[in-house]
Image (cartoon, helix red, strand yellow):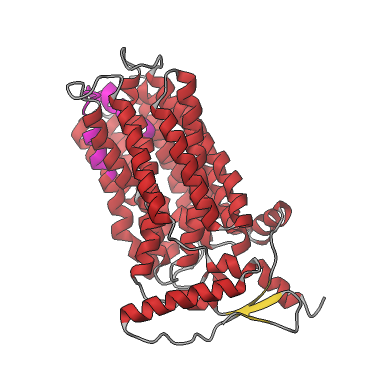
């Protein structure tokens, strides 16, 4: 129970974190996963659709005066830039006003911007609403990952977080197959089909919004922000649901935590905590995000162009190839996710990063030697990204669990924004020319840059990764408010 501690002004002692962590898996947890996790399906749908329709948008009759390079370069960079700004803007609001308010607002922003993208009539309009779509998606990363990690029991947190972030690739599969249908001019005019792909994103988003209304606020956020009684009541209600479903009586945990309740923490305190108190963890977060961002945002944005340019694959069927690659990406977190909770964070994070980087070097060598076809190239990418996707998903898991709770959303936002800006904004702008130049050596350079940064991030993880498996968030990083409570008597 959350009870006021009369010896300290403004403090509360609670067992809410321990009660959440001891819950067995239940229907309530599935509701959390579906309501919050499915948004990555939308992100995957967005990114893949734009990559696959790039060639069609640049053709005569599309209704837009835009080039292939502008779609895969400028528009892609603006989408990622919007995601970076959105993560920082909404990340701060998430820590201030709670997880639930923001994961509803950010989804609404995404829905409105995507609908406007479908109505594009000129390049500038398309660019503007790609930026705003990314703005909403970036906010989702901060709000959703914060809520998921604070609601899911510690023994399941790793696999659930990885699979949820990996569900991006289910959206990529859907986007790839949808683009094949939408780009078929026998079914839809050239100026209509690509618009329908964005319209589908709006429909899916509305369905998710209906489910998400039932997802509660994070009790961990509530008891720190002066709402201890509400947090206690919410957890008690969840416990009753789980006990009725499982037919067992949940024991009262021994662990409790005492915190000083407050409304917000300033940027200065957040920066001091992240970089001065946890410098090794800060380096780890930056390394993981930069590595995965260059591999994915810089290279896979232009995969359709690679198939068309180097293997003479028709733009109307590139979606089939990418659907295969995307499914391989999803299998990585799905099949390897459990090992992040059992084998451990450090060996799995470093292993997936280093192995995927080495495999990408091998793919680059085979491609440069002219030994690959469209099919074998796709097979190589499937193997590389099977491991890379598990590693990339673990980057989000890592930064969401290794910093104090009061800084969680902002830490996710910061590392996502910095890493993604490095690889996701500069990447498409740099590599769009390399992968569409028609020069094999240029594409090999692009692959090797991504591979090098993945391997480097894996080496950093060997030394700096935190053994967070099976541990509560409060054990991994003591909340700042708990430190304040501990220091109160001396003060």
Quarter of the image where one finds residue 302: top left
Q: Residue at x 48, y 22 (%)?
A: 125
User: With respect to residue 3, does 285 lie above or below?
Assistant: above
Can residue 353 be seen here? The reply is no
What span is in magenta?
301-326
Q: Residue at x 43, y 60 (%)?
A: 214
Q: Residue furthest top?
A: 60
* Residue 35 in picture, x, y percent from top left: 39, 56
Q: Residue furthest right?
A: 491
Q: Residue at x 50, y 46 (%)?
A: 106
On screen, residue 12 versus residue 187, left or right, reads right
Front residue of 178/28: it is: 28
Please check the rendered image and state whether residue 319 is part of the magenta-colored stretch, yes or no: yes
Quarter of the image where one finds residue 32: bottom left
Front residue of 205/396: it is: 205
Query: Which secondary structure dominates the residues rendered in magenta?
Result: helix
* Residue 319 in picture, x, y percent from top left: 25, 33
Can residue 435 be seen here? The reply is yes
Please check the rendered image and state whether residue 39 is part of the magenta-colored stretch, yes or no: no
Q: Quadrant of the C terminus?
A: bottom right
* Residue 363 in picture, x, y percent from top left: 30, 38
Q: Residue furthest left?
A: 186
* Residue 444 in picture, x, y percent from top left: 36, 30
Q: Quadrant of the N terminus?
A: bottom right
The number of discs equals 0
Q: Residue at x 33, y 27 (%)?
A: 195
């Amino acid at each position: 129970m959350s009870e006021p501690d009369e010896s300290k002004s403004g403090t509360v002692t609670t067992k809410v974190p321990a009660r959440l962590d001891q819950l067995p898996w239940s229907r309530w947890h599935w509701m959390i996963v579906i309501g919050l996790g499915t948004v990555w399906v939308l992100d995957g749908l967005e990114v893949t659709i734009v990559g696959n329709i790039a060639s069609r948008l640049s053709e005569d009759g599309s209704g837009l005066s835009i080039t292939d390079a502008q779609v895969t370069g400028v528009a892609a960079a603006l989408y990622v830039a919007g995601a970076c700004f959105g993560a920082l803007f909404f990340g701060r609001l998430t820590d201030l006003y709670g997880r639930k308010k923001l994961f509803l607002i950010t989804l609404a922003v995404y829905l409105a911007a995507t609908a406007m993208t479908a109505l594009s009539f000129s390049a500038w309009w398309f660019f503007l609403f790609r930026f705003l779509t990314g703005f909403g998606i970036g906010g989702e990363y901060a709000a959703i990952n914060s809520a998921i990690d604070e609601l899911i029991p510690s023994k399941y947190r790793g696999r659930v977080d990885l699979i949820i972030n990996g569900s991006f690739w289910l959206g990529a599969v859907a986007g790839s197959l949808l683009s094949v249908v939408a780009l078929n001019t026998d079914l839809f005019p050239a100026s209509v089909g690509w618009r329908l792909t964005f319209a589908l994103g709006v429909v899916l988003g509305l369905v998710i919004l209906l489910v998400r209304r039932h997802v509660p606020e994070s009790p961990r956020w509530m008891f720190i922000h002066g709402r201890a009684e509400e947090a206690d009541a919410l957890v008690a209600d969840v416990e009753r649901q789980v006990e009725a479903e499982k037919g067992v009586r949940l024991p009262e945990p021994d662990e409790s935590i005492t915190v000083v309740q407050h409304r917000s923490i300033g940027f200065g305190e957040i920066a001091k905590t992240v970089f001065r108190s946890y410098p090794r963890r800060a380096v780890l977060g930056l390394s993981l995000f930069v590595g995965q961002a260059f591999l994915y945002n810089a290279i896979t944005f232009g995969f359709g162009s690679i198939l068309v340019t180097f293997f003479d694959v028709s733009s109307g069927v590139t979606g089939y190839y990418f659907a295969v690659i995307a499914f391989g990406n999803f299998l990585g977190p799905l099949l390897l996710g459990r090992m992040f909770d059992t084998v451990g964070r450090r060996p799995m994070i470093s292993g997936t990063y280093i192995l995927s980087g080495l495999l990408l070097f091998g793919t680059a060598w085979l491609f440069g030697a002219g030994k690959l076809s469209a099919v074998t190239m796709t097979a190589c990418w499937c193997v590389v990204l099977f491991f890379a996707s598990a590693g990339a998903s673990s980057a989000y898991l890592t930064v969401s669990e290794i910093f104090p709770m009061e800084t969680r959303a902002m830490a996710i936002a910061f590392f996502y924004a910095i890493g993604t800006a490095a690889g996701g904004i500069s990447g498409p702008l740099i590599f769009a020319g390399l992968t569409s130049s028609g020069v094999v050596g240029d594409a090999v350079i692009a692959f090797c840059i991504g591979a090098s940064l993945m391997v480097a991030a894996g080496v950093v993880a060997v030394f700096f990764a935190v053994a967070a498996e099976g541990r509560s968030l409060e054990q991994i990083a003591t909340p700042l408010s708990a430190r304040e409570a501990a220091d109160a008597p001396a003060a």
